[in-house]
Amino acid sequence: MKVPEAFSAYAARGPEWVAFLGRLPGLVRGLLEDWQLTPDGPATHGYCALVLPVRTAGGRPAALKVSWPHWEAELEHIALQRWHGDGAVELLRADPHRVALLLERLHREDLGDLWDVEACEVVGGLYRRLHVPAPAQLVTLSSCVSRWCDELAALPRDAPVPRRMVEQAVSIGRAFASDEGTDGRLVHTDLHYANVLAADREPWLAIDPKPLSGDPHFEPAPMLWNRWDELLAATRSVRDGVRLRFHTLVDVAGLDEARARDWVVLRMMCNALWRLQDPPGTARQLPDEEYLTRCVTVAKSVQD
Ligand SMILES: Nc1ncnc2c1ncn2[C@@H]1O[C@H](COP(=O)(O)OP(=O)(O)O)[C@@H](O)[C@H]1O
Ligand SMILES: [Mg+2]
């Protein structure tokens, strides 16, 4: 098994990654042996995990996913187990200690290959199937929201984001923190274009959940802020492009528009907050100013 160069380059993220990358070849070798798997093609990867195509002892094509250990990855198997292949990739085996999953093999093609609005139709349909009652082991969205509100409220007044929007997000968040609809449903939280792959048994299946016990209305934001360059290049305004995606998701999934809008505003301000909390010198694809503008633009676009 060869670790892709771009994945090895994540060593630049810091000592924890250096240690993980050092362990990785041995970790994969151990899993192949223990689970009687044979490599079946070159490894691929995302931001957090190495994924190796394999065959099981019975000859079934599968994918071995080994993640950098963090709490969200450690909960992934719980969501996949709960879905049982309905709208999501099927889980064949899991080892939470090694943060390793054996998954049904899907295709390379993802929702990035469809027109963005068509992709929103697909994802809106997936929401309806994925938002089932949440397993008890999951972290609750309300507990996350309370923490986010405290951190947003503590942002300095001269932070480079509109103060009014930060205050709006805090008040939205405080209301959600004590709203009983905020917890209880299984939400994916990272359902964007690259986390939906083509499959044989269904046209499209979700992968890579970072699950919470939450509110289905929390879900749309990543479908808005991703594939941004296309919104900039389109003949319609960015605002109209964002709104078209948003309304497609809301309509297809049958979500309450006002509630979904509030979550978008809050999530975009949280994204801005986390960027502002980055230690100085953190390497990022997008410069801070551009990133913060994008957060504000998404939040504004769904509002007027
Ligand atoms: N079940 C699967 N079958 C085939 N390829 C997969 C499968 N799961 C993931 N992949 C590939 O590996 C990449 C990274 O996996 P993903 O679960 O999204 O992890 P990350 O957290 O790193 O984004 C995906 O974008 C996809 O290309
Ligand atoms: Mg992914």
Image (spheres, rainbow, N blue to C red):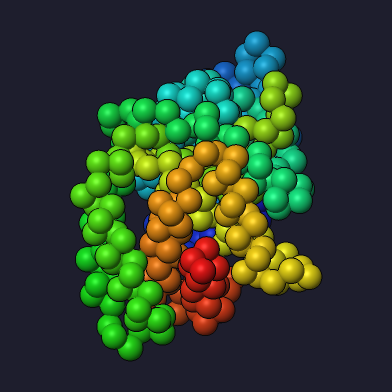
* 286 relative to 118 in the view: left or right: left
Residue 96 versus residue 36 in the image, above or below: below
Q: Residue furthest bottom?
A: 158
Q: Position of residue 58 (x, y in %)?
A: 65, 11
Between 254 and 154, the one nearer to me in the picture = 254
Q: Residue at x 67, y 17 (%)?
A: 60
* 55 relative to 263 in the view: left or right: right
Q: Position of residue 184 (x, y in %)?
A: 31, 35
Q: Residue at x 40, y 81 (%)?
A: 162
Between 133 and 33, the one nearer to me in the picture = 133
* 106 relative to 269 in the view: left or right: right
* Residue 63 appearing in the image: yes
Residue 126 versus residue 257 in the image, above or below: above
Q: Residue at x 63, y 14 (%)?
A: 57
Between 86 and 104, the one nearer to me in the picture = 86
Q: Position of residue 43 (x, y in %)?
A: 66, 41
* 216 relative to 63 in the view: left or right: left
Q: Quadrant of the N terminus?
A: top right
Q: Residue at x 40, y 34 (%)?
A: 186
Between 28 and 47, the one nearer to me in the picture = 47
Q: Position of residue 144 (x, y in %)?
A: 28, 52
Q: Residue furthest top?
A: 58
* Residue 103 appearing in the image: no
Q: In which quadrant of the rendered view does residue 36 lie?
A: top right
Count every numbered label the image shows and give the total. Answer: 0
Residue 196 versus residue 105 in the image, above or below: below
